Amino acid sequence: MARRTAELKPKNAARPGALIRAAGGLCFTLLAACGSGSAAAHDAAAAVDAPGPAVDAGTGTDATPAIDAAPPADAASPADASSPPPPPLPYPAPTYQHLSETGLYRDIAARTLAPSVTPFEPTYKLWSDGAQKQRWIRLPPGTRIDTSDMDHWIFPVGTQVWKEFSLDGVLLETRLVERYGTGPDDVWMGAFVWNADQTDADFAPDGVQDIAGTMHDAPKQKDCGSCHRGETGRVLGFSAIQLTAPASGPNLATLQAAGWLSRAPAPGGYPLGADPVTTAALGYFHANCGHCHNPAGTAWPDTQMVLRSSVADSGLDTTSVTQTIVNVPLAYWRGGSIIWRVAPGQPDKSAVVARMSARGNDDQMPPLATEVVDSTGLDTIRAWITSLAP
Protein backbone atom coordinates (compact mmCIF):
# COMPACT_ATOMS: atom_id res chain seq x y z
CA MET A 1 0.00 0.00 0.00
CA ALA A 2 1.31 3.39 -0.90
CA ARG A 3 1.79 5.77 2.02
CA ARG A 4 1.78 9.53 2.22
CA THR A 5 3.03 10.86 5.52
CA ALA A 6 3.51 14.38 6.79
CA GLU A 7 5.96 15.09 9.59
CA LEU A 8 4.66 17.85 11.78
CA LYS A 9 7.74 19.63 13.13
CA PRO A 10 7.04 21.75 16.20
CA LYS A 11 8.18 25.34 16.22
CA ASN A 12 10.16 26.85 19.07
CA ALA A 13 7.20 28.60 20.62
CA ALA A 14 5.05 27.27 23.38
CA ARG A 15 1.31 27.04 23.09
CA PRO A 16 -0.27 29.67 25.35
CA GLY A 17 -1.16 28.15 28.70
CA ALA A 18 -4.27 30.28 28.79
CA LEU A 19 -5.72 28.21 25.96
CA ILE A 20 -5.78 25.14 28.17
CA ARG A 21 -7.14 26.98 31.19
CA ALA A 22 -9.84 28.80 29.22
CA ALA A 23 -11.64 25.58 28.36
CA GLY A 24 -12.84 25.20 31.94
CA GLY A 25 -15.36 28.06 31.61
CA LEU A 26 -19.03 27.90 30.71
CA CYS A 27 -20.40 24.38 30.69
CA PHE A 28 -23.31 22.08 31.22
CA THR A 29 -23.44 18.35 31.61
CA LEU A 30 -23.81 15.55 29.06
CA LEU A 31 -24.32 12.03 30.30
CA ALA A 32 -20.79 11.02 29.41
CA ALA A 33 -19.33 9.04 32.28
CA CYS A 34 -15.67 8.02 32.10
CA GLY A 35 -14.96 4.37 31.40
CA SER A 36 -12.87 1.86 33.30
CA GLY A 37 -9.09 1.70 33.50
CA SER A 38 -6.80 4.56 34.42
CA ALA A 39 -9.55 7.15 34.74
CA ALA A 40 -11.85 5.04 36.89
CA ALA A 41 -11.75 7.64 39.63
CA HIS A 42 -13.55 10.08 37.39
CA ASP A 43 -16.97 8.48 37.07
CA ALA A 44 -18.81 11.78 37.47
CA ALA A 45 -20.49 13.11 34.33
CA ALA A 46 -18.16 15.17 32.18
CA ALA A 47 -18.76 18.84 31.59
CA VAL A 48 -19.20 20.03 28.03
CA ASP A 49 -18.51 23.65 27.26
CA ALA A 50 -21.64 25.59 26.42
CA PRO A 51 -21.15 27.81 23.39
CA GLY A 52 -21.25 31.54 23.23
CA PRO A 53 -21.65 33.06 19.78
CA ALA A 54 -20.79 30.32 17.32
CA VAL A 55 -17.45 30.64 15.61
CA ASP A 56 -16.74 28.98 12.29
CA ALA A 57 -14.17 26.22 12.79
CA GLY A 58 -12.32 27.07 9.62
CA THR A 59 -12.18 30.84 9.64
CA GLY A 60 -12.76 31.90 13.24
CA THR A 61 -15.60 34.25 12.20
CA ASP A 62 -19.10 34.44 13.66
CA ALA A 63 -21.17 31.71 12.08
CA THR A 64 -24.17 31.19 14.31
CA PRO A 65 -26.60 29.00 12.35
CA ALA A 66 -30.31 29.51 12.73
CA ILE A 67 -30.94 25.77 12.99
CA ASP A 68 -28.86 25.16 16.11
CA ALA A 69 -30.76 24.12 19.21
CA ALA A 70 -30.12 26.24 22.28
CA PRO A 71 -29.01 24.56 25.52
CA PRO A 72 -31.87 23.69 27.87
CA ALA A 73 -32.78 26.58 30.14
CA ASP A 74 -32.35 24.48 33.28
CA ALA A 75 -28.87 23.35 32.29
CA ALA A 76 -27.15 26.67 32.93
CA SER A 77 -25.22 27.50 36.06
CA PRO A 78 -25.06 31.01 37.55
CA ALA A 79 -21.70 31.50 35.85
CA ASP A 80 -23.35 31.11 32.47
CA ALA A 81 -24.61 34.67 32.61
CA SER A 82 -21.12 35.93 31.76
CA SER A 83 -19.66 35.82 28.28
CA PRO A 84 -17.34 32.94 27.40
CA PRO A 85 -13.71 33.71 26.62
CA PRO A 86 -13.04 34.49 22.97
CA PRO A 87 -12.16 31.50 20.80
CA PRO A 88 -8.44 30.88 20.42
CA LEU A 89 -6.55 32.34 17.51
CA PRO A 90 -4.03 30.22 15.59
CA TYR A 91 -0.88 29.60 17.60
CA PRO A 92 2.53 27.96 16.97
CA ALA A 93 2.72 24.20 16.81
CA PRO A 94 2.99 22.78 20.34
CA THR A 95 6.34 21.71 21.76
CA TYR A 96 5.03 19.19 24.26
CA GLN A 97 7.51 16.85 25.93
CA HIS A 98 5.16 15.26 28.46
CA LEU A 99 1.49 14.33 28.55
CA SER A 100 1.08 16.39 31.72
CA GLU A 101 1.69 19.53 29.63
CA THR A 102 -1.28 18.94 27.30
CA GLY A 103 -4.07 19.74 29.78
CA LEU A 104 -5.73 16.32 29.84
CA TYR A 105 -5.24 16.03 33.58
CA ARG A 106 -5.87 18.51 36.34
CA ASP A 107 -3.63 16.34 38.50
CA ILE A 108 -1.80 13.61 36.60
CA ALA A 109 -0.29 12.11 39.75
CA ALA A 110 -3.79 11.49 41.12
CA ARG A 111 -5.05 10.67 37.59
CA THR A 112 -7.66 13.40 37.94
CA LEU A 113 -8.95 14.57 34.59
CA ALA A 114 -9.36 18.24 33.77
CA PRO A 115 -13.02 19.26 34.17
CA SER A 116 -13.13 20.64 30.62
CA VAL A 117 -12.50 17.28 28.86
CA THR A 118 -15.35 15.04 27.75
CA PRO A 119 -15.02 11.26 27.45
CA PHE A 120 -16.54 9.72 24.34
CA GLU A 121 -16.90 6.35 22.68
CA PRO A 122 -17.30 5.69 18.95
CA THR A 123 -20.08 3.39 17.79
CA TYR A 124 -17.65 1.22 15.83
CA LYS A 125 -14.25 0.36 17.31
CA LEU A 126 -10.76 0.19 15.84
CA TRP A 127 -9.00 -3.09 16.61
CA SER A 128 -5.81 -2.48 18.61
CA ASP A 129 -4.62 -6.02 19.36
CA GLY A 130 -6.83 -6.28 22.42
CA ALA A 131 -5.68 -3.08 24.13
CA GLN A 132 -8.29 -1.22 26.19
CA LYS A 133 -8.90 2.37 25.09
CA GLN A 134 -10.34 5.55 26.51
CA ARG A 135 -10.94 8.74 24.56
CA TRP A 136 -11.49 12.38 25.47
CA ILE A 137 -12.12 15.60 23.60
CA ARG A 138 -11.86 19.27 24.56
CA LEU A 139 -13.63 21.85 22.43
CA PRO A 140 -12.68 25.47 23.19
CA PRO A 141 -15.53 27.49 24.71
CA GLY A 142 -17.30 29.81 22.31
CA THR A 143 -16.75 27.47 19.36
CA ARG A 144 -18.63 24.88 17.35
CA ILE A 145 -17.57 22.07 15.07
CA ASP A 146 -18.19 22.91 11.42
CA THR A 147 -20.60 20.14 10.42
CA SER A 148 -21.76 21.73 7.16
CA ASP A 149 -20.35 18.60 5.50
CA MET A 150 -21.77 15.92 7.76
CA ASP A 151 -19.24 13.36 6.49
CA HIS A 152 -16.22 15.53 7.21
CA TRP A 153 -16.28 17.61 10.38
CA ILE A 154 -13.85 20.51 10.73
CA PHE A 155 -12.78 21.26 14.28
CA PRO A 156 -12.06 24.74 15.64
CA VAL A 157 -8.58 25.92 16.52
CA GLY A 158 -7.64 24.67 19.96
CA THR A 159 -9.56 21.37 19.75
CA GLN A 160 -7.74 18.49 21.44
CA VAL A 161 -8.57 14.78 21.16
CA TRP A 162 -6.79 12.14 23.25
CA LYS A 163 -6.81 8.34 23.05
CA GLU A 164 -5.30 6.24 25.82
CA PHE A 165 -4.16 2.63 25.38
CA SER A 166 -3.75 0.21 28.29
CA LEU A 167 -3.39 -3.53 28.72
CA ASP A 168 -4.23 -5.47 31.87
CA GLY A 169 -4.39 -2.25 33.87
CA VAL A 170 -1.00 -0.95 32.70
CA LEU A 171 -1.02 2.37 30.84
CA LEU A 172 0.94 2.08 27.58
CA GLU A 173 0.53 5.28 25.56
CA THR A 174 -1.75 8.25 25.07
CA ARG A 175 -2.07 9.87 21.65
CA LEU A 176 -3.07 13.46 20.98
CA VAL A 177 -4.49 15.24 17.95
CA GLU A 178 -4.60 19.03 18.37
CA ARG A 179 -5.60 21.68 15.87
CA TYR A 180 -3.45 24.79 16.29
CA GLY A 181 -4.20 26.68 13.05
CA THR A 182 -6.75 27.06 10.28
CA GLY A 183 -4.81 25.22 7.57
CA PRO A 184 -5.63 21.58 6.78
CA ASP A 185 -2.26 20.44 8.10
CA ASP A 186 -2.13 22.76 11.12
CA VAL A 187 -2.68 19.73 13.31
CA TRP A 188 -0.25 18.34 15.87
CA MET A 189 -0.28 14.55 16.20
CA GLY A 190 1.89 12.45 18.43
CA ALA A 191 2.13 9.71 21.04
CA PHE A 192 3.18 9.91 24.69
CA VAL A 193 4.54 6.68 26.20
CA TRP A 194 3.87 6.13 29.90
CA ASN A 195 6.87 5.72 32.15
CA ALA A 196 7.49 2.69 34.34
CA ASP A 197 6.17 4.49 37.43
CA GLN A 198 2.94 5.39 35.58
CA THR A 199 3.34 8.99 36.78
CA ASP A 200 3.54 10.68 33.36
CA ALA A 201 4.02 9.88 29.69
CA ASP A 202 6.89 11.13 27.53
CA PHE A 203 6.53 12.38 23.96
CA ALA A 204 7.93 9.71 21.61
CA PRO A 205 8.61 11.35 18.21
CA ASP A 206 10.34 8.20 16.95
CA GLY A 207 7.76 5.83 18.39
CA VAL A 208 8.41 2.96 20.78
CA GLN A 209 8.28 -0.77 20.07
CA ASP A 210 6.89 -3.36 22.50
CA ILE A 211 5.91 -0.92 25.25
CA ALA A 212 6.25 -2.34 28.77
CA GLY A 213 7.13 -5.76 27.39
CA THR A 214 3.90 -6.06 25.41
CA MET A 215 3.40 -6.33 21.66
CA HIS A 216 1.93 -2.82 21.60
CA ASP A 217 3.83 -0.19 19.62
CA ALA A 218 3.51 3.59 19.65
CA PRO A 219 3.75 5.10 16.16
CA LYS A 220 6.38 7.52 14.96
CA GLN A 221 5.05 11.06 14.74
CA LYS A 222 5.74 11.22 11.01
CA ASP A 223 3.57 8.13 10.47
CA CYS A 224 0.43 9.50 12.16
CA GLY A 225 -0.66 11.07 8.89
CA SER A 226 -0.76 7.66 7.19
CA CYS A 227 -4.20 7.19 8.72
CA HIS A 228 -5.32 10.66 9.78
CA ARG A 229 -4.73 12.38 6.44
CA GLY A 230 -7.53 10.29 5.00
CA GLU A 231 -10.00 12.48 6.91
CA THR A 232 -10.36 16.18 6.13
CA GLY A 233 -10.61 17.20 9.78
CA ARG A 234 -7.79 14.80 10.76
CA VAL A 235 -9.88 13.44 13.66
CA LEU A 236 -11.03 9.82 13.50
CA GLY A 237 -13.79 8.39 15.69
CA PHE A 238 -15.60 11.64 16.51
CA SER A 239 -17.98 11.99 13.57
CA ALA A 240 -21.61 11.77 12.50
CA ILE A 241 -21.56 8.03 11.82
CA GLN A 242 -19.41 7.20 14.83
CA LEU A 243 -21.59 9.17 17.26
CA THR A 244 -24.95 7.94 15.98
CA ALA A 245 -25.27 5.11 18.50
CA PRO A 246 -22.36 4.95 20.96
CA ALA A 247 -22.76 2.64 23.95
CA SER A 248 -21.85 5.49 26.28
CA GLY A 249 -20.87 9.15 26.23
CA PRO A 250 -22.20 11.91 23.99
CA ASN A 251 -24.15 11.18 20.84
CA LEU A 252 -25.39 13.36 17.99
CA ALA A 253 -28.53 14.41 19.83
CA THR A 254 -26.70 15.50 22.99
CA LEU A 255 -23.99 17.29 21.01
CA GLN A 256 -26.63 19.17 19.07
CA ALA A 257 -28.43 20.13 22.27
CA ALA A 258 -25.12 21.32 23.70
CA GLY A 259 -24.56 23.57 20.70
CA TRP A 260 -21.41 21.79 19.55
CA LEU A 261 -22.56 21.31 15.94
CA SER A 262 -22.99 24.07 13.35
CA ARG A 263 -25.56 22.06 11.40
CA ALA A 264 -28.21 19.81 12.90
CA PRO A 265 -27.84 16.09 12.11
CA ALA A 266 -30.72 14.04 10.76
CA PRO A 267 -33.18 12.82 13.38
CA GLY A 268 -32.00 9.42 14.52
CA GLY A 269 -28.52 9.99 13.14
CA TYR A 270 -26.91 7.83 10.47
CA PRO A 271 -27.13 4.10 11.28
CA LEU A 272 -25.38 1.83 8.83
CA GLY A 273 -26.97 -1.15 7.09
CA ALA A 274 -30.52 -2.42 6.93
CA ASP A 275 -29.93 -5.54 9.05
CA PRO A 276 -27.65 -6.36 12.00
CA VAL A 277 -25.19 -8.48 10.00
CA THR A 278 -24.66 -5.76 7.41
CA THR A 279 -24.51 -3.07 10.08
CA ALA A 280 -21.72 -4.87 11.90
CA ALA A 281 -19.70 -5.43 8.71
CA LEU A 282 -20.04 -1.90 7.35
CA GLY A 283 -19.21 -0.50 10.79
CA TYR A 284 -16.11 -2.66 11.03
CA PHE A 285 -14.89 -1.56 7.61
CA HIS A 286 -15.61 2.06 8.48
CA ALA A 287 -13.59 2.04 11.70
CA ASN A 288 -10.73 -0.24 10.69
CA CYS A 289 -10.24 0.32 6.97
CA GLY A 290 -12.08 3.46 5.91
CA HIS A 291 -9.43 6.01 6.91
CA CYS A 292 -7.12 4.65 4.17
CA HIS A 293 -9.69 3.23 1.77
CA ASN A 294 -11.49 6.38 0.64
CA PRO A 295 -10.80 8.94 -2.12
CA ALA A 296 -8.56 10.98 0.21
CA GLY A 297 -6.82 8.00 1.81
CA THR A 298 -3.37 6.59 1.23
CA ALA A 299 -4.71 3.39 -0.38
CA TRP A 300 -6.78 5.14 -3.03
CA PRO A 301 -4.12 5.43 -5.79
CA ASP A 302 -3.60 1.66 -5.76
CA THR A 303 -7.11 0.35 -5.15
CA GLN A 304 -9.91 2.87 -5.75
CA MET A 305 -11.67 0.91 -3.01
CA VAL A 306 -14.12 2.60 -0.65
CA LEU A 307 -14.45 1.12 2.83
CA ARG A 308 -15.54 4.31 4.55
CA SER A 309 -19.32 4.77 4.66
CA SER A 310 -20.98 8.12 4.15
CA VAL A 311 -24.13 9.53 5.72
CA ALA A 312 -25.87 9.00 2.37
CA ASP A 313 -25.38 5.25 2.90
CA SER A 314 -27.42 5.25 6.11
CA GLY A 315 -29.91 2.40 6.31
CA LEU A 316 -28.88 0.86 2.98
CA ASP A 317 -27.40 -2.54 2.20
CA THR A 318 -26.09 -1.50 -1.22
CA THR A 319 -23.68 1.37 -0.61
CA SER A 320 -20.56 2.99 -1.99
CA VAL A 321 -18.67 0.38 0.03
CA THR A 322 -20.39 -2.69 -1.35
CA GLN A 323 -20.23 -1.33 -4.89
CA THR A 324 -16.43 -1.26 -4.82
CA ILE A 325 -15.84 -4.68 -3.27
CA VAL A 326 -18.70 -7.14 -3.93
CA ASN A 327 -18.13 -9.08 -7.17
CA VAL A 328 -15.24 -6.72 -7.96
CA PRO A 329 -12.07 -8.41 -9.30
CA LEU A 330 -8.71 -7.79 -7.67
CA ALA A 331 -6.84 -4.80 -9.09
CA TYR A 332 -3.53 -4.84 -7.23
CA TRP A 333 -3.05 -7.72 -4.80
CA ARG A 334 -2.53 -11.21 -6.17
CA GLY A 335 -4.07 -13.92 -4.05
CA GLY A 336 -3.47 -17.06 -6.05
CA SER A 337 -6.82 -18.76 -6.55
CA ILE A 338 -8.61 -15.79 -4.98
CA ILE A 339 -9.72 -13.38 -7.69
CA TRP A 340 -12.50 -11.34 -6.05
CA ARG A 341 -12.39 -8.71 -3.35
CA VAL A 342 -15.63 -10.16 -1.99
CA ALA A 343 -17.13 -13.30 -3.49
CA PRO A 344 -20.77 -13.38 -2.33
CA GLY A 345 -21.52 -16.41 -0.18
CA GLN A 346 -17.87 -17.51 -0.23
CA PRO A 347 -15.73 -15.92 2.48
CA ASP A 348 -12.81 -18.29 1.83
CA LYS A 349 -12.65 -17.06 -1.77
CA SER A 350 -12.75 -13.38 -0.77
CA ALA A 351 -9.57 -11.31 -0.66
CA VAL A 352 -10.74 -9.18 2.27
CA VAL A 353 -10.93 -12.30 4.45
CA ALA A 354 -7.55 -13.60 3.28
CA ARG A 355 -5.83 -10.29 3.99
CA MET A 356 -7.55 -9.75 7.34
CA SER A 357 -6.29 -13.22 8.31
CA ALA A 358 -2.64 -12.39 7.55
CA ARG A 359 -0.04 -10.85 9.86
CA GLY A 360 3.69 -10.32 9.57
CA ASN A 361 3.90 -9.98 5.79
CA ASP A 362 2.85 -7.69 2.96
CA ASP A 363 -0.52 -9.41 2.69
CA GLN A 364 -1.81 -8.26 6.07
CA MET A 365 -4.61 -5.76 6.42
CA PRO A 366 -4.54 -3.35 8.10
CA PRO A 367 -0.89 -2.99 7.06
CA LEU A 368 0.23 -1.28 10.27
CA ALA A 369 -0.59 -0.86 13.96
CA THR A 370 -1.57 -4.50 14.48
CA GLU A 371 0.29 -7.77 15.01
CA VAL A 372 -2.65 -9.94 16.10
CA VAL A 373 -5.57 -11.06 13.94
CA ASP A 374 -8.91 -9.71 15.12
CA SER A 375 -10.81 -12.99 15.29
CA THR A 376 -14.09 -11.33 16.29
CA GLY A 377 -13.83 -8.80 13.47
CA LEU A 378 -12.94 -11.57 11.03
CA ASP A 379 -16.04 -13.53 12.10
CA THR A 380 -18.10 -10.38 11.52
CA ILE A 381 -16.91 -10.03 7.94
CA ARG A 382 -17.20 -13.76 7.21
CA ALA A 383 -20.79 -13.77 8.45
CA TRP A 384 -21.65 -10.83 6.22
CA ILE A 385 -20.08 -12.38 3.10
CA THR A 386 -21.86 -15.66 3.84
CA SER A 387 -25.16 -13.78 3.96
CA LEU A 388 -24.70 -12.35 0.46
CA ALA A 389 -26.51 -14.13 -2.34
CA PRO A 390 -24.04 -15.58 -4.89
Image (tube, grey):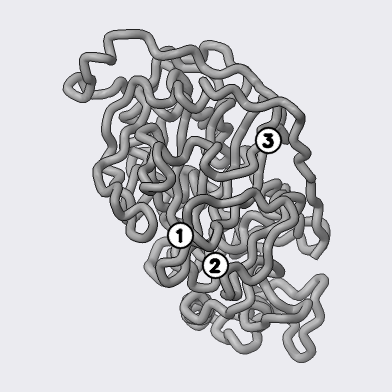
Label 2 element class: loop
Which quadrant holds residue 151?
Answer: top right
Q: Earlier in the sequence, mark 1 or mark 2?
A: 2
Which residue is tagged 2? 128
Which quadrant holds residue 3?
Answer: bottom right
Q: Can you see residue 317? A: no
Q: Can you see residue 22? A: yes
Numbered disc total? 3
Q: Earlier in the sequence, mark 3 or mark 2?
A: 3
Q: Residue furthest top?
A: 82
Image position, residue 121 (x, y; %)? 40, 52
Label 3 element class: loop
Which residue is tagged 3? 95
Image position, residue 125 (x, y; %)? 47, 61
Name which residue type carries label 2. Ser
Q: Earlier in the sequence, mark 1 or mark 3?
A: 3
Q: Answer with left or right where residue 347 lies relative to residue 250.
A: right
